[in-house]
Structures are given as structure tokens and as C-alpha cells.
């Protein structure tokens, strides 16, 4: 056979590559871009505040001494922001901590809500749509803390507030009245100090339940309060944790596609993340631990960064001393498991948030870098495939020359390991039809051409549509009409 020696050589190369490479697409890619300056950023958010279609940045500027401020950086283009912020005073608060965005008065314009570290004072900046705000202050009974949660726990269509009383061992609840003020509701006593409160319908009964991690007495625990009516809860169910550490954030999200929210949070004992799957009744099973994080993990965030339909996780550390730390990206497998996909060097982190910052349809990461005095946007440059273009194509004709031969395998290997970039027709290069383009595809083609392996899946050997549409697409098909 004319190509036998060449093919044999290529097969040996492929086998060597397979021994050292399991994934050629680089996984989830989050790339830091230009930072936004603000003094001691404890939290930042991203939202279109003025309705112009561009994402604006919001940062809490809370130096230990001096005036406490809120910075807004208007979006000037997708992924770009004004160099000089619009500044608003937060003088009504002792030490602002906790930042949320929402439409509290139902006028169609997003408002800004901030909490306080030392008391239950809520400042609501009511938006007008042009970066002009009126300030509404509410003082609730109880203590303040390191977080703030804004959610409609009453079910009346108005946003309410939940304050973790980090110093008082309480959870303070305030019902929104629709004007920007909040009316004192229940104050829940806890056995320890909480740093955050998560709200979700964990038993799917239409009511908002609370998940509250707290620490005290030499141990850390997650408390779950299931609602029996809006704002009224059954006795707390507890899930003890290894070690005694504070938990600044917790994700309550469905990670295994059964419809029930699960718990994913940092594991300070094993320096990674811990997963507890919902049992379908609002209870949670034994934890699964996935190590790989910083020695002092503090913050988590969740999103489907690679658009494969599965929830991924991000874990960030905080040294509390303005040093470098790490951001660990965990890829979710859709069944409740995670693997470390990448580790990034970062400045000290005080909070993580996610949003599509540049309007390209991918979820990006926003990192608040605390007393290092800036906010860092991380743009998502993951090759997610699937641009929605579904031209007819011929599977295995990776180089789009109208022939199926060894040149297609060589071309695929070149893209994967030498030239980089993307093929014009991802679907055509997905030779084994497993919904990914990687080294297994040229292996499959060489096996078919020279070793009696299986023929590529349809459409093959003539033009046709993808018989099993997936995230891959065919943007350019030079041989199919």
C-alpha cells in the first residue's frame, strides 16, 4: 500500500502523544485583563445599570479609615470600561460589606444594595437609569457581617434581604416594602457566626429555604433551614464539617441534572471543594472531597464556563496579607464529580462573582482583590465550539479538500499540536463522533484507513447534516452546497 510506511510512522507518533496528552483543547481558559483601581475592594459586581446593553462595573471602596465609597465604572464597549469611576458616598454605614444588584422597587431599573460589617444597616441606591441614585437607609435590629443576600423569600414579588450576623450568631431577615426600605422580620439564632447565607428551594416545594454555614465552639457546620411557609422554617438540620474554618461563600446549585440543588463549598481541611448531593427530599448525603486548592481557601463561584451543560467551580484563596494566592478551576462532569482543570496565580481575593462581561455569550469571572486596591476581570477564552452554524459536511474530511485520506489525519494533528487554532468545520474533524475534537479523532481515521477500523459516522462519505447535533458546528463547508 502506498501510504503504509507513512501511516505506520504516524500511528507511532499518535501513540506517543496519547501516552502524554489526554486533552488537546486546553480546557477552561480564564485570562486576566486590565484591572480597575479602587481602594480596598471587598466585593464587586457587574451589571448593565443604565440599559445601554453594555456591562458596567461596581466596586465597594472601603478603606479602614476615611470615607467609604461606591465606584461605578460605566461600560464603554464590550469588555471595556471608563478609566475614571462615578463615585457615591456610603457614609451612612460604619464599614460597608456585602454588595448586591437588583430591582427593589420594580421600576425596571437595577438598584444597588449594600450591607455593613458591624450592624444591620442596609443602604439602597435607587437607580434612575442614568447613573443618578437616591439613597435609602434602613436600620434593622441585629448584627452585621461579611455578606448580604438579596432574594424574594416572602414570595410577594419584592426583593428582601438576609444578613449573616457574623459577630452575633444570627441571621437577620428584612422584608422589602417596594420603596427601597426593608421591614424587620425574623432574627434567627445560630450556634455560631455565619459569614454567608445561601437561598434556594432545595426541596422543590415552591418556598425559599436557607443554607447557612457557620463556625464556633471549635467546629464548622452547615445549617439547613427548610421553609414550611414564606419566611418560616422547620428546625435546623446540621451537617458538620472537618476542622474549624469560616466559609465566606457556598454554592447551592444542581450539579448532577436531577433538578434538585446540591451543596458545593470550600473544604478548608483538605484545601479543596466538598460536594453534598441532594437526596431528592431536601436532605444532603455524605460529602465527596476534591482537593487541589490553595492552603487558605476562602471563596467559591459556580458557572458553566465551557458551555457543556455542566456546572463548573472556581475556588480562590485569601492570605489576608496582600500576598499572591491561587484560583483553582474545577471542571464538572455533570454527575456530581469535579476534576482540577487549571490553576491560576492571583492576587489576594476577597470575593468572586460571575457574569458575561464582554457580551460574547461566555461566563467570565470577576475577582475582588481586597486591600491590593483593584478589581480583576478574567475573560473566558474557552473554546466552547458550537457557534450555532450547522452546514452540511462530510465527516472525516477535516481539511475540506473533498477526499478522505491520510492528509485529513495529518491536518488534524497539525491543528491539535502544531498550528493551533480551530478547523473550519469542527464536525468534519470529529471523526469518532464523540462531540469533541481531540487526538482520538486522527487515531480513529488512521485505524479506518489502514487497520480495518470502523468507518466514520454519518454523514459519510457524502454530504449531509449532523445526525446527532452537539456543541460542535460546521461554520465553513467548502465541499458541500
Image (cartoon, rainbow, N blue to C red):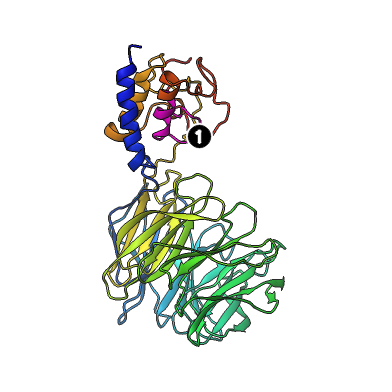
Q: Residue 349 at x, y = what percent? A: 35, 67
Above or below, 227 against 438 in this view is below
Magenta residue check for 257: no
Tell which of 362 and 333 is nearer to you: 333
Q: Is residue 320 left or right of residue 438?
A: left
Decide if residue 44 is in sight here.
no
Q: Is residue 404 left or right of residue 154?
A: left
Q: Residue 135 at x, y = what percent? A: 47, 73
- Residue at 61% across / 83% down in the picture? 187
Tell which of 419 and 44 is nearer to you: 419
Above or below, 213 against 130 in this view is below
Decide if residue 351 is in sight here.
yes
- Number of callouts: 1
Q: Is residue 405 left or right of residue 233?
A: left
**Magenta part of the chain:** 430-445
Q: Residue 472 at x, y = what percent? A: 48, 33
Query: Which of the 4 quarters of the picture holds residue 348?
Result: bottom left
Residue at the spot of label 1: 434
Above or below, 336 against 38 in this view is above
Query: Which of the 4 quarters of the picture holds residue 222?
Result: bottom right
Query: Which of the 4 quarters of the picture holds residue 429?
Result: top left
Above or below, 205 against 481 in this view is below
Crowding at mark 1 (Cα within 10 Å: few <14, some 14-19, many 20+): few
Taken as a whole, is the magenta stretch helix, strand or loop?
loop
Disc 1 is placed on an element classified as loop
Q: Quadrant of the N terminus?
A: top left
Tell which of 338 and 61 is nearer to you: 338
Magenta residue check for 431: yes
- Residue at 57% across / 80% down in the picture? 171
Q: Residue 95 at x, y = what percent? A: 40, 80
Amino acid at each position: 500500500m502506498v501510504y503504509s510506511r507513512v501511516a505506520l510512522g504516524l500511528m507511532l507518533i499518535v501513540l506517543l502523544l496519547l501516552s502524554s496528552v489526554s486533552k488537546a483543547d486546553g480546557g477552561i481558559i480564564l485570562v486576566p485583563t486590565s484591572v480597575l483601581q479602587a481602594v480596598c475592594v471587598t466585593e464587586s459586581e457587574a451589571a448593565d445599570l443604565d440599559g445601554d446593553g453594555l456591562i458596567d462595573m461596581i466596586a465597594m471602596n472601603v478603606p479602614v479609615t476615611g470615607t467609604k465609597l461606591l465606584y461605578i465604572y460605566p461600560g464603554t464597549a464590550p469588555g471595556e470600561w471608563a478609566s475614571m469611576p462615578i463615585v457615591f458616598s456610603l457614609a451612612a454605614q460604619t464599614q460597608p460589606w456585602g454588595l448586591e444588584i437588583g430591582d427593589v422597587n420594580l421600576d425596571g431599573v437595577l438598584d444597588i444594595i449594600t450591607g455593613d460589617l458591624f450592624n444591620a444597616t442596609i443602604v439602597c441606591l435607587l437607580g434612575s437609569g442614568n447613573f443618578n441614585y437616591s439613597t435609602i437607609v434602613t436600620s434593622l435590629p441585629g448584627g452585621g457581617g461579611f455578606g448580604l443576600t438579596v432574594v424574594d423569600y416572602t414570595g410577594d414579588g419584592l426583593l428582601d434581604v438576609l444578613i449573616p450576623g457574623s459577630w452575633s450568631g444570627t441571621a437577620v431577615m428584612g422584608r422589602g416594602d417596594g420603596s427601597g426600605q426593608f421591614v424587620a422580620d425574623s432574627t434567627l439564632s445560630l450556634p455560631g457566626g455565619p459569614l454567608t447565607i445561601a437561598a434556594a428551594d432545595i426541596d422543590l416545594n415552591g418556598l425559599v429555604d436557607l443554607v447557612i454555614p457557620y463556625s464556633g465552639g471549635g467546629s464548622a457546620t452547615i445549617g439547613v433551614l427548610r421553609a414550611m411557609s414564606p419566611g418560616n422554617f422547620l428546625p435546623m438540620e446540621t451537617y458538620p464539617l472537618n476542622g474549624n474554618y469560616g466559609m465566606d461563600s457556598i454554592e447551592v446549585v444542581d450539579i448532577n441534572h436531577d433538578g434538585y440543588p446540591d451543596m458545593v463549598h470550600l473544604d478548608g481541611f483538605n484545601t479543596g471543594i466538598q460536594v453534598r448531593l441532594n437526596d431528592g427530599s431536601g436532605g444532603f448525603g455524605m460529602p465527596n472531597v476534591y482537593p487541589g486548592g490553595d492552603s487558605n481557601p476562602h471563596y467559591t463561584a459556580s458557572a458553566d464556563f465551557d458551555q457543556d451543560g455542566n456546572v463548573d467551580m472556581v475556588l480562590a484563596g485569601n492570605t489576608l496579607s496582600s500576598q499572591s494566592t491561587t484560583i483553582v478551576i474545577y471542571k464538572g462532569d455533570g454527575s456530581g464529580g469535579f476534576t482540577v482543570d487549571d490553576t491560576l496565580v492571583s492576587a489576594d481575593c476577597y470575593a468572586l462573582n460571575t457574569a458575561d462581561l464582554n457580551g460574547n455569550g461566555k461566563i467570565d469571572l470577576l475577582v475582588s482583590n481586597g486591600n491590593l486596591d483593584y478589581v480583576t476581570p478574567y475573560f473566558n477564552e474557552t473554546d466552547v465550539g458550537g457557534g450555532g452554524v450547522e452546514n452540511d459536511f462530510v465527516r472525516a474530511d477535516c481539511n475540506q479538500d473533498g477526499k478522505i485520506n491520510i492528509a485529513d489525519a495529518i491536518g488534524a494533528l497539525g491543528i491539535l499540536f502544531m498550528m493551533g487554532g480551530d478547523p473550519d468545520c469542527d464536525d468534519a474533524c470529529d471523526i469518532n463522533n464523540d462531540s469533541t475534537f481531540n487526538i482520538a479523532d486522527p487515531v480513529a481515521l488512521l485505524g479506518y484507513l489502514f487497520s480495518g477500523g470502523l468507518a466514520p459516522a454519518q454523514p459519510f462519505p457524502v454530504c449531509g447534516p449532523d445526525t446527532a447535533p452537539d456543541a460542535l458546528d460546521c461554520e465553513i463547508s467548502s465541499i458541500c452546497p
